[in-house]
Image: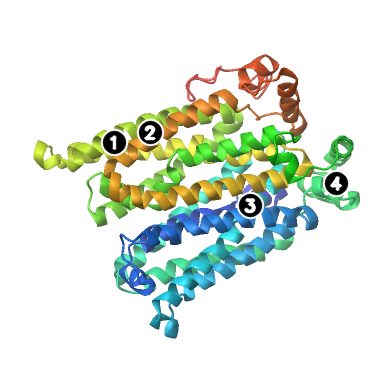
Amino acid sequence: MVGFNVRKVLDKQTQVVLFSSTAIALYGYDQGMMSLINTNKSYLSTMGITEESPIVGVIVSIYYLGCAVGAVLASKFADVKGRRPGIFACLATASAGNLLMFVAGFGKMGQSSNLALATMLVGRIVMGLGVGGIDSVVPVYSSELSSDDQRGTALAQEFQANIFGLNMAFIVNIIVTHRLGKWDQWAWRTPIIAMQIYPALLFAGANLLPETPRWLVFNGDEDRAKKSIARVFGKDAVDDRIKELRDAQKQEEEAGSVSYADMLLPSGSQFHPTIITIMGQVNQALTGYGAVSVYGPQIFELLGFGVTESEYITLGNYLFYFMMMTLAWVLIDRVGRRRLMLQGALWLSISFALLTVLGGLASNRQQLSIPRLATGIPSIIVLYLATSVFGIGWLVPPWLIPTEIFPSTARAQGAAISVVIWGLANFAVTLLTPIGFNNLKYFLLLVFAATNAIAWVLTYLYCPETGNRTFEENQEFFSAAAEKGSWRVAKVDGGGYRTLPKGGDDGHEESETSPLLRGRE
């Protein structure tokens, strides 16, 4: 058993997943990190703001603007210098931003709340530049080093690490907050600086990982590409994969290079896949889980729990989230990305509608003479399950699909656009959520019920199933859509892109509305 585990750790594909997972965990760590810092009295005093101030939301959300810019810069850098150098440049940037956040208001700087706030804002932006770049390059790096039928599993495993990062940050927050108190500056500085463990681990393992063969072939370095293939997939796979990459390179050279104009203008050759990418990230934001991740304790307070109770219940939610994410990488290549998103949006819409009712009952509990547990326990159950549904159905697909639908010459730009839209959408959500708390109260949850319904409709109409198909096969969908003159998935290729291709992992198609966990034939 020990020998088996050692061999698995030494396997290059496993190392790629571990490396990518650690990088993606940075994204989750930041979400968990700010959730309790936002309520720390020392932090608020140092920044010269109150807990109800809209500046709290600005500090959280401005990070996402940094992510949007970082994604564009990193994708360009990764196209020119390589996927792996791009990742390390982003790690260094994220680390620098984190250090700026840590020293904000420290020592003599603490004498000026304006200087402390400015330093924190700059730190958030710089860290966003790095993390946005990581979120842009890592999915491309991972997908280019995965087999066609394992891309979803690999990325889902990496995003489970995202939830690990969220849990780690929240646990560190709870420990230092309850040991030091909300008036101690180290109760908010410690969770910030603890993030440095991720860049340290990644830089330590830098030499273990190869560049992607696809990038090497497309940049004229076949010798290194062959070595990379041998390291990751084995020597027997070298000839076949090199031939596939040469053919793909030839096809894309004939098609010509792809610019951002080709992707963003309606007349552009990659406009359709770009809209699918944008739609996926907007729909993910519409699920409302950016708000739940960052403002989890406040959500439970809306549902009638006290401050300390909400913090521990939120921790339980995050831990359950992490465990249930295992189903994401078990299911994503078996049932497909589209079906997970459709069923996820449906159940999230129902869950938020139920939570609105429970929030209303909780806020009027005394007038209605309702026992506290009568609303509290159902609220916990519904929100825990809703969080799990989001993790299984919506956390991974909007990041995965852009890595599967663009040609190699546009894949990094496509991933960058994905992160830009994710950054802008989450900027809006995390900026507006505190305002929603203050003005809409529990009716904010009804807004999320409606936006999930919108996400379901858009996904059903326009999002193709990209699982268990080669990059080139997925691009054929867009050619067929252009010939048909319709973007409706049901009308393209006889509706063949509504489900996984026949002869997939189990040899038969399933309806996208079939229950996910029914017995397999």
Instruction: Give the camera-side residue of 517 and 6.
Output: 517
What is the distance, in whole Å, between disc 1 and disc 3 at their CAs? Answer: 37 Å
CB-based contact (under 8 Å), mark 4 and mark 2: no
Q: From the viewer's perspective, is 444 left or right of 407?
A: left
Q: Is mark 4 on a helix, strand or loop?
A: helix
Q: What element carries label 3?
A: helix
Residue 438 vs 191, above or below: the answer is: above
Closer to the eye: label 1 or 3: 1
CB-based contact (under 8 Å), mark 4 and mark 1: no
CB-based contact (under 8 Å), mark 1 and mark 2: yes
What is the distance, in whole Å, between disc 1 and disc 2 at their CAs? Answer: 9 Å
Q: From the viewer's perspective, is 295 left or right of 10?
A: left
First in sequence: mark 1 vs mark 2: 1
Q: Mark 3 points at which residue?
A: 20
Q: Name the residue under label 1.
A: 356
Q: Position of residue 148 (x, y in %)?
A: 71, 34
Looking at numbered disc 3 in the image, what kind of residue is underneath it? Ser
First in sequence: mark 1 vs mark 3: 3
Name the residue located 10 percent from the left edge and 36 percent from the top edge: 368
Closer to the eye: label 3 or 4: 4
Name the residue located 69 percent from the left edge and 19 percent from the top edge: 503
